Image: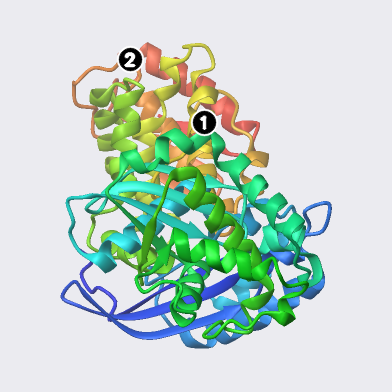
Amino acid sequence: MQKNPPEIVAAVDLGSNSFHMIVCSLNQGKLTTIDRLKEMVRLASGLDKKNNLDNKTQTRALECLERFGQRIRNFPPGSVRIVGTNTLRTAKNATEFLVKAEKALHHPIHIISGIEEARLIYQGVAHSLGSNASLRLVMDIGGGSTEYIIGTGDTPKEKESLYMGCVTVSDRFFRDGKLSRIGFTQACLFAEQELEPFEKKFHRNNWDEAIGASGSLRAIAKVLEAKNWSNNGITRDGLEQLVSYMIQRNHISELDLPDLDPERLPVFPGGVAIAYATFRTLGIEQMTISDGALREGLIHDLLGRIYHQDIRSVTVQGLSGRYHSDKAQAFRIKKTIGYILNQLNPDACLFINENATQFLKWAADLHEIGRDIAHSQYHKHSAYIIENGDLAGFSKQDQILLATIIRSHRRKFALSRFQDLPEPWNTQAPYLTLILRLAVLLRRNRHDDELPNFAIAIERTTITLKFPVDWLSQSPLTRADLILEADYMKAADFTLSFS
């Protein structure tokens, strides 16, 4: 646990339809919700044909984030988690937008994969419902993607994220609010085609109860109950009546749907089509609605990090085992990393902090997993697995950072690999990589023998190592490795001296 856990924490979900923020007080590990903010931004509607986010939508989104930022800008680092989902995964100019968005919020934003989004959604639902031994199907219709998860208790077992959402389907099949039987049929067929490869996995035969999360499913449930087409969440019969009613209208302005937020009306047909196609494809008859969703999952995930129950560490250990990494060697390297860090001055070496140290330890655990694919160029294989895998708890930025450190831990040391990392990693990661390189070098023989008490100093671009008298002369292989390493560092304008 942190010495002084924050008293208030927050989570922000930059969805493809709406932006959500939840603020909670934290007292002895218990969360109490004290504030919620939500604005419908429709980020997905701002993607042009080349998948660039247009200026008008960016402006609308940033104005919302300025308001959110006013609430959380003074929160300490580590007390806020902000994630972007499908649209920010897709937008080619997402990096440009994120720079402005982080300035508005005063906190870093992480882009998460669809599978990670599914995991967090399930966590939010599980915590809102409490412990339950039955198998649940959880469905969440977002603006640009729809997630399906089967799990029990707080453990997700199957996860998928499909590229269809209430905004994208509405924009494609119900353009300008136009309704028709043909349009609805085409929208349902599109959704069924997306779901077809996963029909067997998520079919009614594989779970006990269906639970909906997200504004779209909540809005559908409210409409069905207001129309007396259902009295218990969403039913298949109720959906049939809603669809029959909608396809008899020519435009969304003709819909008389009590309890439907007017802001949601433009994207409501897309959400209904996805829900209806899902009920038919998976054999769902009834679905209850949960209050928990992605932002609640984020808050509980943040709680785990604060109290040192970080799912990312569990993921790293699982990945290490799956690829048969040498755990004894990883332990030796982590021990050497700790010895090096203890000698460095945190005031002079700004990369020494708890978060950076954690990434360095994860890199030590995973740097050799590529050997399970091929020994030649194994560092490249390791980096590829980490950058492209579905790693629970890690954002895309986390994975790229970890992959970059591991890709650079041996052979050529190119500073250009670090330039595109977000601040402060673009300047800190090279130093973390240098420490990993030295630890791996000094432990190359894989022996359990203790290393001598050597001294190390890092000052800007100069690294100085001092070993006990005669140790290097008695360790000719290590000396040869250090000479080669000095050449690698020299090519990157670093100086490594040793004696």
The residue that label 1 is drawn on is 383
Horizontal and vertical percent for residue 213? 42, 64
Residue at 19% from the left image edge and 21% from the top image edge: 448
Give the quadrant of residue 197: top right
Identify the image quadrant of the N terminus.
bottom left
- Per the image, label 1 sits on a secondary structure element best described as helix
Real-space CA distance between mark 1 and mark 2, rounded to the nearest whole angstrom:
31 Å
Horizontal and vertical percent for residue 468? 27, 29
Give the quadrant of residue 263: bottom right
Residue 226 vertical placement versus 471 (above, below): below
Q: Nearer the viewer, residue 490 or 446?
A: 446
Residue located farthest toward the right when viewing the structure as drawn: 49
12 relative to 456 in the view: left or right:
right
The mark closer to the camera, 1 or 2, is 1
The residue that label 2 is drawn on is 475
Give the quadrant of residue 98: bottom right
Residue 267 vertical placement versus 313 (above, below): below
Tag 1–tag 2 contact (CB < 8 Å):
no
467 relative to 166 in the view: left or right:
left
Q: Nearer the viewer, residue 411 or 70?
A: 70
Horizontal and vertical percent for residue 321? 29, 26
Residue at 36% from the left image edge and 40% from the top image edge: 362
Horizontal and vertical percent for residue 270? 64, 62
Q: Amino acid at mark 2?
A: Ser
Residue 160, visible in the rendered structure: yes
Residue at 32% from the left image edge and 22% from the top image edge: 325
Residue 301, visible in the rendered structure: no
Q: Earlier in the sequence, mark 1 or mark 2?
A: 1
Q: Amino acid at mark 1?
A: Ala
